[in-house]
Image (cartoon, rainbow, N blue to C red):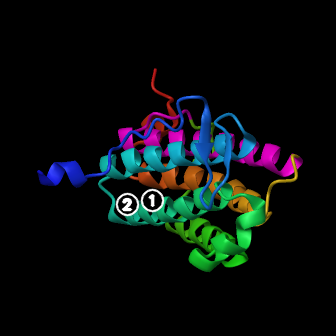
Amino acid sequence: MSSSSYRKKVYTKFGDKGETSLLYGGRVSKNSPNTEAYGITDEAVSAMGLARSLSDNSKVKDILRNLQRELFTIAAELATDPEKYDLFKEHFAPVTQEMVDNLENTIDTLEQEFEMPKVFVLPGGSPASSAIDMSRTIIRTAERRVVAVAEDGLLTNGLILTYLNRLGDLLFVLARYQDKEIPIERATGDIS
């Protein structure tokens, strides 16, 4: 037998009927609030990866990489059946107030390093900031999906909502920080 016969296939066919597995067991509709929430969170992780690949600023890249890692934890938390939450906590650290505080500290630090535009910002100042802004809008969608999870009584950690809200703020500031060296007209979309 060749070594390729021992490889696990990417496709399982288990989701062909519109259901998916949760992290520690159980199956739900691919349209369930939790699946929607962690799916949108995954979209944000990918958009941040695009932003990171487009940025030439090492600080921006480091911040985005750390945020991507934290969002994997959030997605795992959202992909866990509330009845299996203790099992999740044995393997992962849930979202904490310290993580929220770190987002706020990052915003404060960035805002000390440059002056935020005092006019409306039209995304598109640079490819990197555009991708960061796209990440921000995806995070706002994830936030709305998590509200639906909470309204269904399935949110095990309310700090996820706080984290996502603050993350949207940070991404707005980070996009402006990314463009801090370019002319304000270009950074705000004020080009005639």
Q: Main secondary structure of the magenta part?
A: helix
Pointer 1 residue: 64
The kind of residue tagged 2 is Lys
* Apparent side of residue 92 relative to residue 78 in the rendered image (left or right): left
The kind of residue tagged 1 is Leu
The stretch of residues the image draws in magenta is 122-151
Give whichever of 64, 72 is nearer the camera: 72
Q: CA distance from mark 1 to mark 2?
A: 5 Å
Pointer 2 residue: 61
- Indicate the position of residue 68 as horizontal and vertical percent values: 48, 59
Residue at point 72%, 57% (across, down): 81
| Quadrant in which residue 92 is drawn | bottom right
**Pointers 1 and 2 in contact (C-beta within 8 Å):** yes
| Magenta residue check for 187 | no
* Apparent side of residue 25 relative to residue 8 in the rendered image (left or right): right
Residue at point 64%, 51% (across, down): 168
Furthest residue in direction front, as rendered: 1
Residue at point 47%, 55% (across, down): 177
Q: Secondary structure at mark 2?
A: helix
- Residue 182 visible in image: no
The residue carrying pointer 2 sits among few (fewer than 14), some (14 to 19) or many (20 or more) residues within 10 Å by Cα, namely: some
Residue at point 62%, 48% (across, down): 38
Give whichever of 92, 57 is nearer the camera: 92
- Indicate the position of residue 53 as horizontal and vertical percent values: 31, 49
Give whichever of 51, 59 is nearer the camera: 51
Does 74 appear above or below 148?
A: below
